[in-house]
Image (spheres, grey):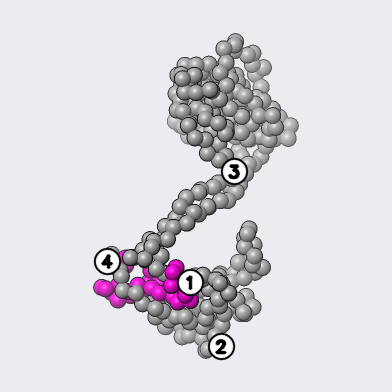
């Protein structure tokens, strides 16, 4: 059996969101070394604060200052910190109920080892040296055996309020395409496009999935398709992707290769973007040493009749 491929894959993007008045005040407060909670109708103080009462769903807006000291309610030791976590040495994840709050805040506790952590221990906020209005303005918690500090009673009004945040999202994992797609990728390296035929409905799937999505049976019969095909539908891309050296606008299309019963996607080149159309006949263009088609270009053939590809839209 051919070797099944695998490779590291990273999915990463910046997540941008605006803030309501409660979250805006909370994050601005952290920038100013003030911890704010929000009071509910039944008198509870929630930290971190939320915009709506978790019981009644009513709007919340009464902000109250709580202490930067508190008590650990539960914890777990992190032996191997990952990239982007609060500390780069082993630490404890802790839920801390700050003095004056009725709920607990999740953050990191800097401690020499798990034997130094316990439920009920007293801790305090260690502020980041540079603060921007984010939860990371709390660098971590640290053990504390002093008195509870006096609270000024801040009302949550600041100058230059934080109105939005950008949170980077990233997922690192190892992807394996499986037997069927490994064979498909290997065939592309020899400039061939190979799908698999369902033994029941006889449809040919490209890229192959290892099983027919309609009949639910395993597919194993390999069928070479293309190389030419028909544009079934397309979109014009106007936003340049990072790390992709393609000038915008360009066209990305679904292409039904001759002999296939499933359209795959590819970039259309060799033609102005505003002349791409449904039914356009195209062929792959390979670059030297490329393991897959760089793009598809028009063949010069007459456009395909709609009835020949309507089932593949």
Q: Secondary structure at mark 2?
A: loop
Q: Which of the marked residues, 2 or 4, is nearer the chain's N terminus?
A: 4
Are there few (<14), some (14-19), or many (20+) residues within 10 Å of tag 1?
some
Residue 233 coordinates in the image, percent (x, y): 50, 74
State which tag comes first along the sequence, 1 or 2: 1
Residue of label 3: 167
Query: Which residue is tagged 1?
Result: 189
Q: Looking at this rendering, what residue extends furthest in the right direction? A: 159
Mark nearest the camera among 1 and 3 is 1
Give the residue number, with chain letter if any, for mark 4: 217
Range drawn in magenta: 185-212
Distance from Cα at disc 3 to Cα at disc 4 = 42 Å
Q: What secondary structure prevails in the magenta region? A: loop
Q: Name the disc covering residue 269, or none.
A: none
Going 67% across and 25% down the picture, which residue do you hit? 33
- Measured Cα–Cα span from mark 4 to mark 1: 28 Å
- Name the residue: 70% across, 32% down: 130
Comparing 56 with 294, the one in front is 294
Q: Which residue is at 68% across, 35% downward?
A: 132
First-in-chain label (4 vs 1): 1
Image marks 4 and 1: residues in contact by CB distance under 8 Å: no
Q: Is residue 270 above or below residue 208?
A: below
**Callout 3: SS:** strand
Contact? badges 1 and 2 (CB < 8 Å)? no
Quick check: marks 3 and 2 in contact, CB under 8 Å?
no
């Amino acid at each position: 059996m051919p070797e099944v491929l695998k490779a590291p894959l990273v999915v990463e993007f910046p997540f941008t969101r605006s803030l309501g008045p409660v979250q805006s005040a909370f994050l601005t407060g952290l920038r100013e070394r003030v911890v704010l909670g929000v009071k509910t109708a039944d008198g509870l103080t929630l930290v971190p604060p939320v915009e709506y009462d978790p019981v009644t769903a009513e709007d919340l807006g009464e902000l109250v200052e709580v202490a930067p000291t508190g008590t650990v309610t539960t914890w777990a030791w992190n032996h191997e910190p990952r990239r982007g976590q609060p500390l780069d040495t082993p630490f404890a994840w802790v839920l801390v109920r700050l003095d004056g709050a009725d709920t607990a805040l999740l953050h990191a506790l800097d401690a020499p080892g798990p034997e130094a952590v316990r439920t009920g221990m007293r801790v305090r906020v260690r502020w980041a040296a540079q603060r921007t209005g984010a939860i990371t303005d709390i660098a971590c918690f640290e053990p504390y055996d002093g008195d509870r500090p006096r609270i000024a009673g801040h009302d949550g009004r600041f100058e230059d309020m934080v109105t939005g945040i950008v949170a980077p999202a990233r997922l690192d994992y190892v992807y394996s395409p499986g037997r069927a797609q490994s064979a498909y990728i290997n065939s592309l390296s020899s400039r061939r496009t190979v799908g698999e035929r369902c033994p029941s409905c006889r449809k040919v799937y490209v890229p192959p999935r290892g099983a027919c999505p309609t009949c639910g049976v395993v597919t194993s019969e390999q069928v070479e398709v293309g190389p030419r095909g028909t544009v079934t539908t397309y979109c014009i891309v106007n936003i340049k992707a990072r790390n992709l050296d393609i000038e915008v606008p360009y066209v990305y299309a679904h292409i039904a290769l001759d002999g296939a019963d499933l359209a795959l996607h590819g970039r259309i080149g060799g033609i102005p973007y505003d002349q791409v159309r449904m039914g356009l006949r195209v062929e792959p263009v390979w670059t030297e040493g490329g393991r897959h088609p760089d793009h598809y270009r028009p063949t010069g053939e007459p456009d395909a009749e709609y009835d020949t590809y309507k089932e593949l839209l």
